[in-house]
Image (cartoon, rainbow, N blue to C red):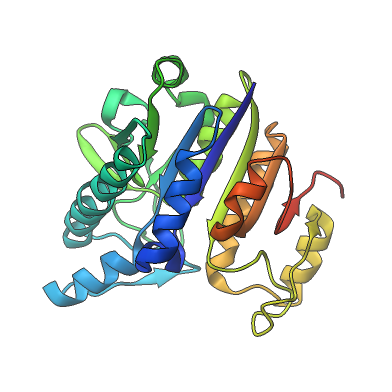
């Protein structure tokens, strides 16, 4: 059976018309599906109003104690519940979750090496509570995940791309999974200034060469890293593309960048 793990973020969450169209397409998918959302720009905007500075390294947020409170409120509250409410209005029985709910995504606080990321969680597919997740899907529910995990009673900020990848890997033993990273561009671009320069297929070897050449902007790197990790771990298909193409990309067509296992 087909299962879609779909991550939404970027400018789509900031534009009501684009978000409404995406959620309508998502609600119409006739297969088990899970939505994972980000919301970094919204968190940064609200944080700025509260005097909380946003700090990033390689596209990943540094999460100190005030920032953890901020992302918990914004990701787990504001964005998550707005998405759930809109999906309910579209006839999709959505259930808003963090990794703490049902102990579905236990994590480990990232150890300090060269960079102290603060309250950031690392997750692995082996620890996903797949049984509980399957029960939700089989019961007709559609999980909507905020990018938060937990360890020892503490919530942890976790990259939404990583959560989507880990869920896809965990469920790939039971479903034919297509993992889709949706954002506002048509796919992975060879030239960030040329919206038409979409790389239609990207192998690991081609990715590594382009990475050495400095072809990728920081924001796309977590998506690519997680895409290749998912492919190596058994996910059948990983696609990075425009949220506006969701109907095509869940209906047997492929628009955007298809990540392949070759090379």
| Above or below for 185 versus 20 | below
Residue 16 figure quarter: bottom left
Q: Residue at x 36, y 41 (%)?
A: 90
Across and down, in percent, residue 145 comes to: 37, 40
Across and down, in percent, residue 83 comes to: 31, 48
| Above or below for 106 versus 131 | below
Across and down, in percent, residue 12 comes to: 44, 64
| Above or below for 190 versus 245 | below
Q: Identify which residue, 175 or 16, lies in the foreground.
A: 16
Which residue in the rendered view is the most extreme toward the bottom? 193
Which residue in the rendered view is the most extreme toward the left? 50
Residue 60 figure quarter: bottom left
Across and down, in percent, residue 103 comes to: 31, 25
Left or right side of 237 for 217 = left
Which residue in the rendered view is the most extreme toward the right? 263
Q: Identify which residue, 2 or 99, lies in the foreground.
A: 2
Q: Residue at x 61, y 18 (%)?
A: 174
Q: Residue at x 29, y 72 (%)?
A: 54
Q: Which residue is drawn at 57% across and 52% down?
A: 181
Left or right side of 146 for 113 = right
Which quadrant, please, contains the N terminus? top right
């Amino acid at each position: 059976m087909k299962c879609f793990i779909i991550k939404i973020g970027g400018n789509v969450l900031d534009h009501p018309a684009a978000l409404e169209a995406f959620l309508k397409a998502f609600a119409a998918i006739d297969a088990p599906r899970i939505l994972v959302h980000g919301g970094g720009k919204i968190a940064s905007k609200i944080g700025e109003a509260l005097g909380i500075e946003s700090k990033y390294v390689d596209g990943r947020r540094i999460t100190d104690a005030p920032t953890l409170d901020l992302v918990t409120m914004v990701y787990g509250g504001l964005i998550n519940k707005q998405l759930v409410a809109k999906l309910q209005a579209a006839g999709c029985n959505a259930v808003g979750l963090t990794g703490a709910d049902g102990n579905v995504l236990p994590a480990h606080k990232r150890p300090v090496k060269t960079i102290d990321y603060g309250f950031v969680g690392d997750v692995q597919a082996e620890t996903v509570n797949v049984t509980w997740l399957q029960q939700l899907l089989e019961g007709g529910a559609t999980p909507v995940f905020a990018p938060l995990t937990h360890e020892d009673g503490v919530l942890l900020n976790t990259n939404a791309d990583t959560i989507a990848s880990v869920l896809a890997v965990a469920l790939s033993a039971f479903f034919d999974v297509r993992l889709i990273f949706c954002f506002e561009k048509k796919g992975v671009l060879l030239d960030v200034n040329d919206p038409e320069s979409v790389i239609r297929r990207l192998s690991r070897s081609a990715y590594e060469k382009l990475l050495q050449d400095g072809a990728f902007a920081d924001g796309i790197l977590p998506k690519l890293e997680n895409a290749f990790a998912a492919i190596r771990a058994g996910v059948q298909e990983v696609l990075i593309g425009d949220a506006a193409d969701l109907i095509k990309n869940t209906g047997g067509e492929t628009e955007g960048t298809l990540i392949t296992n070759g090379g």
